[in-house]
Structure formats: structure tokens, C-alpha cells
């Protein structure tokens, strides 16, 4: 085992930066020509509208003149295609229908689901990206992975199962649809050593396992916990809770049914996720307000924009997904070579209170620091739809245990108020509520609720 490879695909994953940029540019030129020839929407709405063709895109700055694509526009292309062709694949899907072998989808929680169309080539690309992530963190054939995410056609479902199996791992795709007891039943029955779930569900499982099966979560034998769908390893208090609760290594990772993939490493403090798919994805930053390009320099913050490379089915081009990220170009102490990023939050989750931008994950990080004085659970209460918040910022936070005195609760509120004011530059109004009184969810947990919904 001493000579075992460190990377799944060392020839690509250790490619020097200059050579990777050259490969990216070569693939980008090829992809732009492909998109132009095979998609009416890209040709007319993205190239011709700004008097561009692939032939006159000779620099990266030329490429950035192509208008951005958004989720709303993506949904419009599906609806327009249904109207004109009787199916949703006529405008942005570039491969012929007889080459499409899978349709993935978003959950559609904020509107009509958006579809991802994949050919065999695209599925192979996804499987390669998944293998790169899990191999780096120590998984090998023989590991048993319990997949406790929503299954079916969503990007954390079948695409993830396929990728895990393709690299030789054993998958237990139990999902979360059957409830917590079913997840625990299959954990006891199949004995996985790897768990993939939202960190919210991880927290919930730590709390519920003793009640449901009379054991602590750390007795389940989980050695790796991979956070999906929400920040986990990047919030120190939450990372510690998951590490200690399961007795496992904890990693953030992203990338389900698309070409943008990242994985965190073991370095402390958390350095972000490593961007491991630059040969199949061009990553850009834009200003979330003006949509103008933001230079990719160390520490830069902007809305994430990506373009798929070497992709046949539905190759997204300058797609603005709505995630705000920060990038880091300085070398990481772990030795992995590529750029890193932190997901700060969704652009549509960002709140603005007296001119200050507030991300729910940042508040959760502060609240987690006060465990065991708090349980870590909270909700941000809005009087009206965001992003503008009329001060004060209202928070409901669970105190840590039923035996807390009024003085202890007072000190918790004072401490939280001081830290939030100092770090986040906003003055909160905090209401402490009983432990376990805020809803727990197996999927993603929204930290923002509206007063009318309480």
C-alpha cells in the first residue's frame, strides 16, 4: 500500500497551472463551437445578440462578453421548447435525443425543476469527478457508503450512486424518504463506514440515535462523514459536533449532476474546498449586483459562474447559479495543488440589514460556538420577504438544556449579541427558546422563516 497513488487521476490532478489553463482554453474553444452549432438558443440569444461567433472569440475577455444564463432563463427555455416542440429539450440540449441516456433535475423548491440532460460521455465525466473527490479523502473499494440524501432523479441521488459504484465502492442508497428509523435500521443491517447526508440530518441523527436504538451515533461505525447540500465542515462548531458525534472525519463536498466539483481537506483551520474539476469546468466570479467579472485573485468574492467543458448533453455556458463564493489561490498546507473556494451562501439567501450583508451560515457558526449553552439550532425571523431586513435582526435560538438558570440564559444572550455585533456588524434581537423546540429536518434546513409562517 505504500506505493498506492495519492490521486485518482494524477496526470490531470497534478497538471501545472499553465498547462491546465492551456487545456481549458483548448476545450473551451471546442465547446463554444459545439454549443453554437447544436443549440439554437445559444447561437441566437448568447452569441448573435452580442455580435459574437466562436471564430471571433480569441481571448478569455472575448468569452466573457457572452451574456450570463440564469435559472429563470433555463426554465424559460424548457417551457418554450415544450410549446414549440412538445418536449423540453429543443433549445439548450445539444446532443440528439437518441444519445441522451439520463435526465437529472433540481428539486424545484423555488419553482419549476430545471433539467440536466446527459449522454454516456457526460455520465463518465461525472463519475470521474466523484472518484477524484472520494479517493483523495481515503475511500477505496471495500468501503460501504450509506447515502442518506433524497434519491430518485435529483443530483444528490442517482448521479452520486453511479459515481460511487464506478470507482468500486459499495453503495447503500437508503435515502431519507423512509424516515430516520429506516436510515438507522439499514445502518445497523449493512454496517457502512461512510455516511453522506446534509449536516442538518447529521446533527439530527446524533440527537435521535440514542432515543431510537439505545446507542450513541459514534457506536454506528461511521469513519467518514461527507456533508452535502449545506455548509458543514466549514463551520467549526458544526464540524466538531459531527466529528465527535460520529467519531468520524468530516468533509464538505459539492457537485452532483454537473461539472463543478469540490472537496475539502483535513487542514485546520478550514481552508475551503479544492476545485478538482478545472479540466471540465471553467469557473468565473461576477459581481452579484452588476454582473461584471471579478478578478480571480486570492480572497476574491463573487457570484459563481460556470461553463461545462467536454460536455455533450446540456452544456451550461456562463451559467450563474446564484451561489456566492470566495476563492483562494495561495497554496494549501495539505499539498493538494489547485485553487480552493468557500461557499458563503445563496445570493437569494443573503440578507441586508442597515447596509450590512448577512449570510445565515455565518450566524449559525457563531451560535455553534456557544454549545453547550445553546443546542446550535436557530431560526432567523423575517417580518417581510428579504433581502432587506428592518432592524433589529430577529433570531430564535435554542438554549442548551432545561436546567439552565435565568442568569445563565441572560449571559448566553449577552454573549451572542456581543459576538454577532462585533463580527457581523449587526445588532440582533435574540429570543431563547426551549431545547428541541425548533423543527429538525432530514433534508436541507432553512434557517430563514417568515413571521406569518410561525
Image: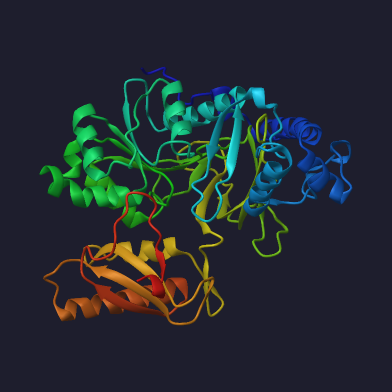
The quarter of the rendered structure image containing the C terminus is: bottom left
Q: Quadrant of residue 134?
A: top left
Image height check: is 411 above or below 131? below
The quarter of the rendered structure image containing the N terminus is: top left
Residue 368 as seen in the image, left or right of residue 321: left
Q: In which quarter of the image is residue 213?
A: top left
Identify which residue, 19 or 302, lies in the foreground.
Answer: 302
- Can residue 243 be spotted in the picture? yes
Image height check: is 357 above or below 163? below
Image height check: is 119 above or below 257? above
- Tell how many labels: 0
Residue 183 as seen in the image, left or right of residue 288: left
Q: Position of residue 311 (x, y in %)?
A: 66, 30
Image height check: is 454 above or below 138? below
Residue 278 as seen in the image, left or right of residue 91: left
Identify which residue, 266 or 216, lies in the foreground.
Answer: 216
Identify which residue, 347 or 13, lies in the foreground.
Answer: 347
Residue 172 as seen in the image, left or right of residue 300: left
- Can residue 317 be spotted in the picture? no
Q: Position of residue 261 (x, y in %)?
A: 53, 39
- Tell me what residue is drawn at x 51 percent, y 27 percent: 127
Q: Where is residue 319 in the image (x, y as percent from the top left)?
A: 66, 47
The colour scheme used here is: rainbow
- Tell me what residue is drawn at x 39 percent, y 63 percent: 447
Q: Where is residue 245 in the image (x, y as percent from the top left)?
A: 23, 47
Q: Quadrant of residue 388?
A: bottom right
Amino acid at each position: 500500500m505504500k506505493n498506492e497513488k495519492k490521486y485518482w487521476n494524477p496526470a490531470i490532478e497534478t497538471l501545472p497551472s499553465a498547462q491546465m489553463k492551456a487545456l481549458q482554453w483548448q476545450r473551451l474553444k471546442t465547446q463554444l463551437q459545439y454549443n453554437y452549432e447544436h443549440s439554437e438558443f445559444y447561437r441566437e440569444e448568447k452569441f448573435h445578440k452580442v455580435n459574437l461567433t466562436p471564430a471571433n472569440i480569441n481571448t478569455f475577455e472575448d468569452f466573457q462578453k457572452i451574456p450570463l444564463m440564469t435559472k429563470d432563463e433555463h426554465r424559460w427555455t424548457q417551457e418554450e421548447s415544450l410549446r414549440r416542440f412538445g418536449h423540453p429539450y429543443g433549445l439548450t440540449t445539444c446532443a440528439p435525443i437518441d444519445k441522451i441516456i439520463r435526465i437529472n433535475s433540481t428539486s424545484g423548491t423555488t419553482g419549476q425543476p430545471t433539467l440536466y440532460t446527459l449522454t454516456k460521455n457526460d455520465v463518465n465525466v461525472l463519475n470521474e469527478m466523484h472518484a477524484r473527490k472520494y479517493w483523495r479523502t481515503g475511500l477505496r473499494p471495500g468501503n460501504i457508503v450509506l447515502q442518506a440524501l433524497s434519491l430518485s432523479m435529483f443530483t444528490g441521488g442517482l448521479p452520486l450512486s453511479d459515481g460511487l459504484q464506478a470507482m468500486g465502492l459499495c453503495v447503500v442508497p437508503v435515502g431519507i424518504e423512509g424516515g430516520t428509523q429506516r436510515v438507522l435500521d439499514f445502518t445497523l443491517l449493512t454496517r457502512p463506514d461512510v455516511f453522506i447526508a446534509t449536516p442538518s440530518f447529521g446533527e439530527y441523527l446524533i440527537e435521535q440515535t440514542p432515543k431510537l436504538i439505545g446507542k450513541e451515533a459514534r457506536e454506528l461505525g461511521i469513519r467518514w462523514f461527507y456533508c452535502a447540500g449545506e455548509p458543514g465542515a466549514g463551520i467549526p462548531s458544526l464540524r466538531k459536533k459531527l466529528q465527535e458525534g460520529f467519531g468520524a472525519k468530516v468533509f464538505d463536498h459539492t457537485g452532483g449532476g454537473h461539472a463543478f466539483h469540490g472537496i475539502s481537506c483535513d487542514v485546520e483551520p478550514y481552508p475551503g474546498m479544492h476545485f478538482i474539476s478545472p479540466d471540465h469546468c471553467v469557473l468565473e466570479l461576477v459581481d452579484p449586483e452588476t454582473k461584471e467579472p471579478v478578478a480571480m485573485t486570492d480572497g476574491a468574492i463573487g457570484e459563481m459562474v460556470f461553463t461545462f467543458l467536454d460536455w455533450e448533453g446540456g452544456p451550461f455556458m456562463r451559467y450563474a447559479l446564484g451561489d456566492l463564493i470566495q476563492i483562494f489561490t495561495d497554496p494549501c498546507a495539505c499539498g493538494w495543488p489547485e485553487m480552493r473556494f468557500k461557499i458563503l451562501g445563496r445570493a437569494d439567501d443573503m440578507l441586508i440589514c442597515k447596509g450590512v450583508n448577512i449570510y445565515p451560515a455565518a450566524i449559525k457558526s457563531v451560535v455553534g460556538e456557544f454549545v453547550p449553552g445553546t443546542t446550535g439550532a436557530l431560526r432567523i425571523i423575517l417580518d417581510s420577504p428579504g433581502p432587506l431586513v428592518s432592524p433589529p435582526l430577529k433570531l430564535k435560538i435554542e438554549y442548551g438544556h432545561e436546567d439552565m438558570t435565568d442568569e445563565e440564559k441572560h449571559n448566553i444572550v449577552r454573549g451572542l449579541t456581543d459576538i454577532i455585533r462585533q463580527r457581523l456588524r449587526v445588532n440582533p434581537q435574540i429570543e431563547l427558546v426551549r431545547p428541541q423546540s425548533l423543527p429538525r429536518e432530514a433534508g436541507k434546513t432553512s434557517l430563514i422563516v417568515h413571521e406569518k409562517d410561525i
